[in-house]
Image (cartoon, rainbow, N blue to C red):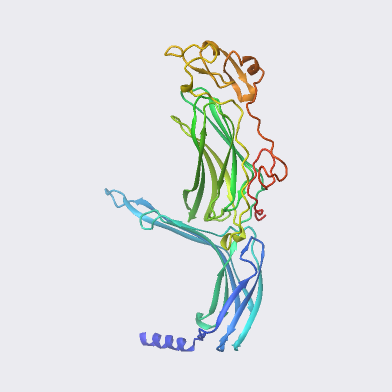
Amino acid sequence: MASIFKAIGNMIENAAEFIDSRNKIHVSMNHRSYVGGDVIQGVVHLNCLVPFHARGVKVKIKGFERAQWEEWKYRDAGEGQPKERYLHHHKDSKEFFCSHVPVYPHEGTVQPGEYHFPFSFQLPPSLPGTFYDKGGHWSNGSGYSAEVVYYCKAIVDVHFKHDLHHKCQFIINEKFDRNVQPSFASNHKTFMFTPGRLTAKVMLDKNVYFPGNTVIARLEANNTSVKPTNKVTVFVYKHLELRSHGEHWNHRHEVYRQQYPGFEPSFYGVRWLPFQIPMNIQPSTTTGHMVKCHYYFVVECDIPGAVDLNVECNTAIMAPQWLFSTAPMPPPAAVLPPDVSFRPPWQPDNSASNCNSCQKGFSLFKRKHHCRACGKIFCDDCTKKTTKILNLGYDENPVRVCDGCYSAASQGGQVFQEAPILPAGPSEEYGEAPVSPPMSPVMISAPPPQ
């Protein structure tokens, strides 16, 4: 029986049509990147040196996503036995589309010569963006990989799968399905043993960026306590979500951080936080079923002796066409507007040994107190009056002020520095990018796909 199957296999092998390796095929496309709904225009180029028999020429266009990861799990090992720990491998894939486009549906002998077969294909709408990421270590429970892939494959169809073919991958840029508009987030915290609160508001000029863009975040902080902030740090996080057969896996990864100086106690003002999105960052992809990736910025205020205050801003990072080929020269970076402090400087405790009003010396029983209107140090007798100071951000509870500032403070107070009015058009002082108050100028970039 084995000899019969071997003879049949030899007959099939002898009857198979092999294509000489000197014959070449190539597929070219009018663009390297597309968005869902675009029409692909391409040409199949066939260079035949040795004649062969073919059943036609076709183009296969396919898009799919694939997710896989490992994790440790436990299962019953039998009655009376401890649970057994084992490594479970999740793997799943899903096609978005798979189409065969006949470009020459005729059977016959291909004679020597050069042939060119044009074709076109309209992509389905709302496709996830091209994506690839992997990390961890396989076989120890931390390995993972995720990909969203699109390719075009030109095929000369012959018998028994000895086809002549060439495959070319192309890029899908995910559509940005929201309006491009400024992004805003805020957060606040109180302290267990210190009165007052810290409020932080972060504003971005838009909610979508490209890799390589410079982002200038506007941080407005209002600290009504005597707690200082040691430093301010901006983090860029990537959140990857994978799904397989009803189970899901999440992974958060820090891709960038930038540190800035902190601010003094009772600070109320504006700080500008410039940072650059890394050029090699993977674009967001959010419309797939098994692979999703999005980004968010976190502005962290480091407060000594207390839980840090975090402000989280969700954003999208899109992929321009040049991302996977040659990056253009970036425009010159914009000049930052000056930082602003609406309150006067806070006088350090170690700089005063006497009251700024009565000149009495401080001691264990004669304590130091700051006037919230002028920021200077006085004794208790000279700062017994309290009032809200609306123009300086003390609008919740009355705060301590000195005798000299009470009259003005009770009328709302005097702002120490005014925020600059940024020009509506190009300006040499603030860079070449047009800006509008209160946001800062940023690097000019093309709009995302709509």
Residue 365, horizontal then vertical, whole percent: 43, 11
Which residue is situated farthest in the right direction here? 425
Classify residue 373 as left or right of residue 424.
Answer: left
| Residue 289: quadrant of the picture | bottom right
- In this view, the residue in front, 392 or 339, is 339
Viewport quadrant of the C terminus: bottom right
Q: Is residue 444 above or below residue 436?
A: below
Q: How many marks?
A: 0
- In this view, the residue in front, 10 or 450, is 450
Residue 251, horizontal then vertical, whole percent: 46, 49
Residue 206, horizontal then vertical, whole percent: 64, 45
Viewport quadrant of the N terminus: bottom left
Identified at 37% across, 51% down, the residue is: 73
Q: Is residue 98 above or below residue 246?
A: below
- In this view, the residue in front, 361 or 260, is 361
| Residue 328: quadrant of the picture | bottom right
Q: Is residue 79 above or below residue 349?
A: below
Report if residue 157 is visible in the image: no
| Residue 297: quadrant of the picture | top right
Residue 239, horizontal then vertical, whole percent: 51, 49
Identified at 59% across, 41% down, the residue is: 217
Report if residue 446 is visible in the image: yes
